[in-house]
Amino acid sequence: MRTTVGIIGAGPAGLLLARLLHNAGIDSVVLESRDRAYVERRQRAGILEQGTVDVLRSAGAGERLDREGLRHDGIELRYDRRRHRVDFPGLTGGRSVTVYAQTEVVKDLVALQLAKGGPLLFEAEALAVEGAESDRPRVRFVHRGAAETEESVLECDYVVGCDGFWGVSRDAVPAAVSQVFERTYPYGWLGILADVPPSHDELVYARHDRGFSLLSMRSPTVSRLYLQVPAEEDAADWSDEAIWDELDRRLETAPGDDWALHRGPITAKSVTPMRSYVHEPMRHGNLFLAGDAAHIVPPTGAKGLNLAVGDVVTFARAFVHFRRTGDTSLLDTYSETCLHRVWQAERFSYAMTTMLHRAPDATPFDDRIQRARLDRIATSRAAETDLAECYTGFPFG
Ligand code: RFL
Ligand code: PHB
């Protein structure tokens, strides 16, 4: 098998890249280790930046998004029983975000790719990227989805590793040139889906002495909520009632405030660890890394999916420019361009995480600093504007 751009992974990064290249008349093959149903059901992100929405729309994947996506003009910060709303358009000159689940983005992109696009092979697991430094890099893979399971080779001009944090493409960068910057947090998120209308029309990020919680949503009838829990927690140890009771405690408002948390049947429950991670550089020879394959942020800033989109937009622009002009300068600066945006997202996600979560070893001093940071946002238009700008998104390179 031969193609121009070999893409490993059919998450949002790989699928969108295949779309952008197809629209520019460049052929690609996507290899995905899991089956279609698994990829379309994996519960993850929910918030799309304006720039992400614009890209999906112009790539031809905006039809259902425009119909079903929920435009959000702000978030609420809740702490010490107080409620502070951050108004995005008012602070950023009109920017907002859209609630549209990653599962739906993936479904839309898979359907488009299968209807009009290059090959997208499910149950095709990349084993290794070889010859990254040559002008003919190869992906060795095993196609379990084929009639007969067989090991094959995909020969490419370029390979883009969009295979997430646990993928294999990063391993093809020699240790001598790799640099990793990393931080793990001593807590995780217990996330639930519940068949109940959201208890608020915007997301609520809550700091509480018992730990962080987040009220989010998937649709007008489905709520998505998270609780900070110890990193090693087992979701099975939490009964539905214990989850709702804990959410009630952490989302408490002042006496006389008539806000209330609505309970409903919980349909999914899982724990996610929290990590910050950056691999530099994001390119080695003719291998490019994009999305979670190159970097991870803790979910508190809602940046992971949006970063993945930024990376593949940067690659597609650079590659199309190269194809039209023979000029490699944009490909040559791919890593630098992406990393600039990545580090801003790392900084913001770290700041949101440490402002809102209670570390197991937190001192009274740490608690006071968290409150002071929240008070600063609630009382300074400059501080609030910074949050609004970061949350609604950094420009794509
Ligand atoms: P993905 O989505 O992990 O896709 C990688 C794909 O590669 C496949 N793969 C392989 N395929 C072939 N051969 C191999 N050897 C392979 N190894 C792996 C995998 O099966 C998979 O299909 O990476 P991608 O495309 O870079 O997308 C990144 C996003 O998924 C991720 O950053 C976000 O989900 C992060 N995230 C959030 N991001 C946001 O922008 N906004 C949010 O609100 C948000 N909330 C979240 C999140 C992530 C969460 N979890 C579970 C980590 C909330 C949570 C709870
Ligand atoms: C989600 O709805 O899954 C979600 C929203 C905001 C975040 C993280 C996750 O910061």
Image: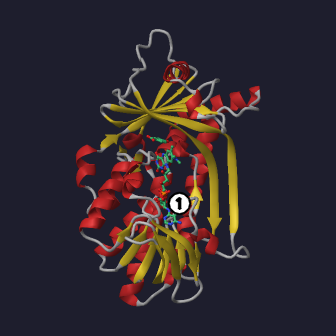
The three-letter code of the residue at mark 1 reads: Gly
Name the residue: 61% across, 34% down: 234
343 vs 186, nearest the viewer? 186
For residue 204, side relative to residue 24 (left or right): right
Q: Position of residue 375 (x, y in %)?
A: 59, 29
Asked if residue 270 shows in the view, the reply is yes
298, above or below 132, in the image:
above
For residue 93, side relative to residue 384 (left or right): left
Name the residue: 39% across, 89% down: 325
Q: Secondary structure at mark 1?
A: loop
143 vs 3, nearest the viewer? 143
Q: Position of residue 370 (x, y in %)?
A: 65, 32
Name the residue: 50% across, 53% down: 304
Q: Position of residue 282 (x, y in %)?
A: 58, 70
For residue 326, side relative to residue 177 (left or right): left
Asked if residue 330 shows in the view, the reply is no
Q: Residue furthest front?
A: 148
Name the residue: 62% across, 37% down: 355
234, above or below 94, in the image:
above
Q: Residues within 10 Å of mark 1 (few under 14, many from 20)?
A: many
209 vs 330, nearest the viewer? 209
Q: Residue furthest top?
A: 256
372 vs 97, nearest the viewer? 97
The image quadrant where one finds the N terminus is: bottom left
Q: Quadrant of residue 293?
A: bottom right
Is the residue marked 1 within 8 Å of ligand 1, measured from its CB? yes
- The residue under label 1 is 164
Q: Quadrant of residue 296?
A: bottom right
Q: Position of residue 210 (x, y in %)?
A: 63, 24
176, above or below 298, in the image:
below
- Image colouring: secondary structure
